[in-house]
Image: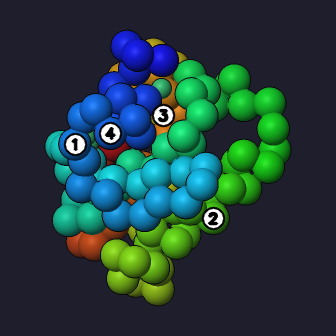
Amino acid sequence: MSNCIFCRIIAGEIPCSKVYEDDLFLAFDDINPVAPVHVVVVPKKHIPTLMDVADDGLMQGLTDALRATARIKGIDNRGFKMVINCNKEGGQVIYHLHAHLIGGGTIDKNKI
Ligand code: AMP
Ligand code: ZN
């Protein structure tokens, strides 16, 4: 979707700080981090929200990509949070499914 910022990042039209990529997922540093490690993990396919996921395999893949990203960032054993905001009252701002990988130290709980 041309008007979706994450689709534009996936297409290479908007730069990002890439952390992990495979055929189906991309992970990049969040532009407004709430902790020392804050990465956004997105499926390359445009799916607006968690409620729109029709394929269980996609969530397995998303979790695998997030765990690979945690290893790259060196927080797999230290610990982290995985957060998915869904729809307006869930705090979702960008309507392209994504999981936040948050860790590496103090987490600002006012933001997530
Ligand atoms: P959410 O509130 O769950 O929709 O989270 C959207 C996240 O995307 C926020 O944490 C933003 O800081 C992040 N974000 C927005 N634009 C960009 C961008 N161009 N590059 C990286 N992260 C972004
Ligand atoms: Zn999109």
Instruction: Determine whether label 4 and label 1 are within 8 Å by CB.
Output: no
Judged left or right of residue 14, residue 50 is right
Residue in the picture at 28% in, 72% down: 104
- One can see residue 64 in this view: yes
Judged left or right of residue 36, residue 102 is right
Of circles 4 and 3, which is in front? Answer: 4
Residue in the picture at 55% in, 60% down: 22
Of circles 3 and 1, which is in front? Answer: 1
Amino acid on which the number 2 mark rests in the picture: Asp
Secondary structure beneath label 4: loop
Along the line of sight, which residue is nearer the eye, 97 or 111? 97
Q: Earlier in the sequence, mark 1 or mark 2?
A: 1
Label 4 and label 1: CA atoms lie apart by: 6 Å
Which residue, given by chain and number where applicable, does mark 3 sit on? 85
Label 1 and label 2: CA atoms lie apart by: 24 Å
Instruction: Determine whether label 4 and label 3 are within 8 Å by CB.
Output: no
The image's mark for residue 68 is: none
Secondary structure beneath label 1: loop
Label 4 and label 3: CA atoms lie apart by: 24 Å
- One can see residue 92 in this view: no
Ligand 1 within 8 Å, label 3 CB: yes
